[in-house]
């Protein structure tokens, strides 16, 4: 994965500091396993994390530049339409 996309908004997920510490620098696949396993209780009330998992679960084992850039565009569209209400 290229350095430019590591900090790209499409590669970020809002979770607690504690959960983030538990995930550390694991691969996306291992992070998913922990989120569905040991960390499931930490995210049970975070619907957007559940939605992320449901939407991207099949893509996570091959998570990379294309997925990140695509998700960034989706987040931008969502922000423009629902947050800032700009068509």
Image (spheres, rainbow, N blue to C red):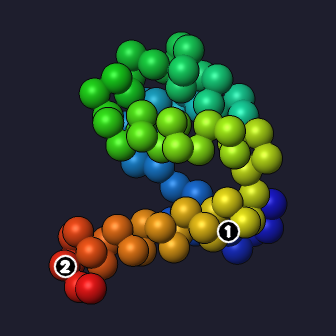
Give the Cα separation between the discs numbered 1 and 2: 27 Å
Total number of numbered labels?
2
Residue 9 placement, left or right of 65: left
Q: Position of residue 48 (x, y in %)?
A: 36, 43
Residue at disc 1, secondary structure: helix
Which quarter shows the C terminus? bottom left
Q: Which mark is residue 85?
A: 2
Q: Is 58 or 36 nearer to us in this picture?
A: 58
Which residue is more in the foreground, 46 or 57? 57
Disc nearer the start of the sequence (1/2): 1
Q: What is the x, y in percent for residue 23?
A: 59, 32
- Looking at the picture, how far across and down is residue 10, in whole percent? 55, 63
> Disc 1 designates what residue?
5
- Could one spot residue 25 in this view of the protein? no
Above or below: residue 8 compared with residue 30: below
| Residue occupying image coordinates x 32% and y 34% | 46
Q: Residue at x 67, y 68 (%)?
A: 5
What residue lies at 38% left-to-right and 27% top-to-bottom?
43
Mark 2 lies on a secondary structure that is: loop
Residue at horizontal 40 percent and vertical 48 percent from the top:
14
Residue 78 in view (yes/no):
yes
Q: Which mark is residue 44?
A: none
Residue most extreme to the front: 87
């Amino acid at each position: 994965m290229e350095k430019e996309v590591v900090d790209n908004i499409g590669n970020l997920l809002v979770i607690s500091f504690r959960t983030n510490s538990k995930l550390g620098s694991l691969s996306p696949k291992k992070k998913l396993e922990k989120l569905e396993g040991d960390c499931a209780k930490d995210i049970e009330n975070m619907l957007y994390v559940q939605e992320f998992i449901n939407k991207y679960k099949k893509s996570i084992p091959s998570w990379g530049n294309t997925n990140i850039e695509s998700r960034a565009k989706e987040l931008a569209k969502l922000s423009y339409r629902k947050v800032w209400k700009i068509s």
